[in-house]
Image: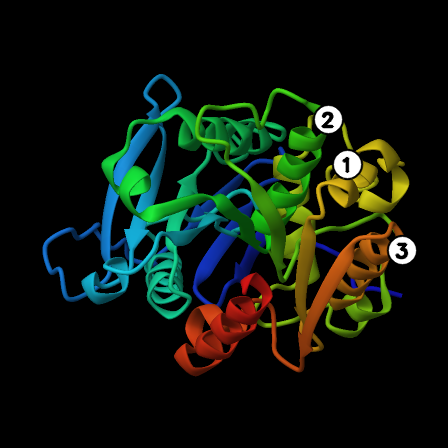
Amino acid sequence: MEPEIPPTGVLRVFHMVDITTYPDGTITCHDPFPCIPASSEDHSAVLSRDVKFNHDLGTWARIYLPPAQTRQQQKLPLVVYFHGGGFVCFNPSTVFNHSLCSGMAASLPAVVVSVGYRRAPEHRLPAAYNDAVEALRWIQTAEDEWLDQFADFSDCYLMGTSSGANIVYHAALRVCKDETAGANPKELKIKGLIMHSPFFGGMERKESELRLFGDMLIPVPALDIFWEQSLPVGADRNHEYCNMNLVDRSPEWETMKSLKWKVMVTGGDGDPLVDRQREVSALLEGKGLDVARFFSDWTHAEELGDSEKAQILFEKIKSFIA
């Protein structure tokens, strides 16, 4: 039997973020992680700059270019990245998200577009999914000098970490369902999905969730709070946004297969979500998709705080997109 979750109190997640819960169901997040400004000055290093793609909604993206010597070669793969944080925390400029995307741009090398989507609880799902699809359409139609000059629009990958991987999956379903979603003059061609430590759930606990219920990085009660704050009002964790096993998306899976998309799923045995991550890879492989797995003994998205492990992840991604 799992421990009881108190109706009020403070839970710590991601080592430093305190989530205060109140009896009326509201929360307050205390996020001490610094934000890093974009930099487009030093041409010997990775360059980055911020661009708004919907001024009314305040949604934006940070674009990364690898060092100049790499940019002098042929056009580079395009990675559209969605950060994690339980749909509630962080943005592209948060220090570890910036470091990951900067390192990825240099190591692959690739042009990386890190998307700043709307967050819960002010903007519950499917707001983030809507923003993801809009970001793709913006990339397709924007007259952006960096993208036009350096990105190979025929070699695009959607990548997300944790809840960002959930966004990747649901945005991909929408692209497959909407035949016009990929129609554009630049012929943006998605080649695959990279689901890094994906964040899914359900009402029934998995063995890994019970075994790692009080995990120091992402305790299961905190995951429950994220779902409560991000799912549509009145929905539980068996909603299709959370539990991908409960809805048959055969038409979209068939489209993914016909488009020859490949999928990479990562996970770690120290992650309470690892059983669900293995289910994700098994489900998609069972639908006929080409699935590459990278499972380790790491904790949830441990690479975000460990440069050596981040480099291992980059090498795995580099092999996947080759």
Q: Circle 2: is it few (<14), some (14-19), or many (20+) Cα within 10 Å?
A: some
Name the one closer to the observer, 236 or 199. 199
Specify which label sits upstream in the sequence, 3 or 1: 1
Horizontal side, residue 147 vs residue 167: left or right: left
Q: Circle 1: is it few (<14), some (14-19), or many (20+) Cα within 10 Å?
A: some
The residue where tag 1 is placed is: 255
Q: CA distance from mark 3 to mark 1?
A: 14 Å
CB under 8 Å between discs 1 and 2: yes
Q: CA distance from mark 1 to mark 2?
A: 8 Å
Q: Circle 3: is it few (<14), some (14-19), or many (20+) Cα within 10 Å?
A: few
In this orientation, does residue 57 appear?
Answer: yes
The image's mark for residue 177 is 2
Q: Amino acid at mark 3?
A: Gly
Q: Amino acid at mark 1?
A: Thr
The image's mark for residue 286 is 3
Q: Amino acid at mark 2?
A: Lys
Label 3 residue SS: helix
Horizontal side, residue 169 vs residue 115: left or right: right
Give the vertical position of 68 relative to 125 (above or below). Answer: below
Name the one closer to the observer, 279 or 252. 252
Give the vertical position of 116 relative to 186 (above or below). Answer: below
Horizontal side, residue 38 vs residue 160: left or right: left
Q: Nearer the viewer, mark 1 or mark 2?
A: 1
At horizontal 77% and vertical 31% (from top left) the residue drawn is 235
Residue 222 % position (x, y): 63, 55
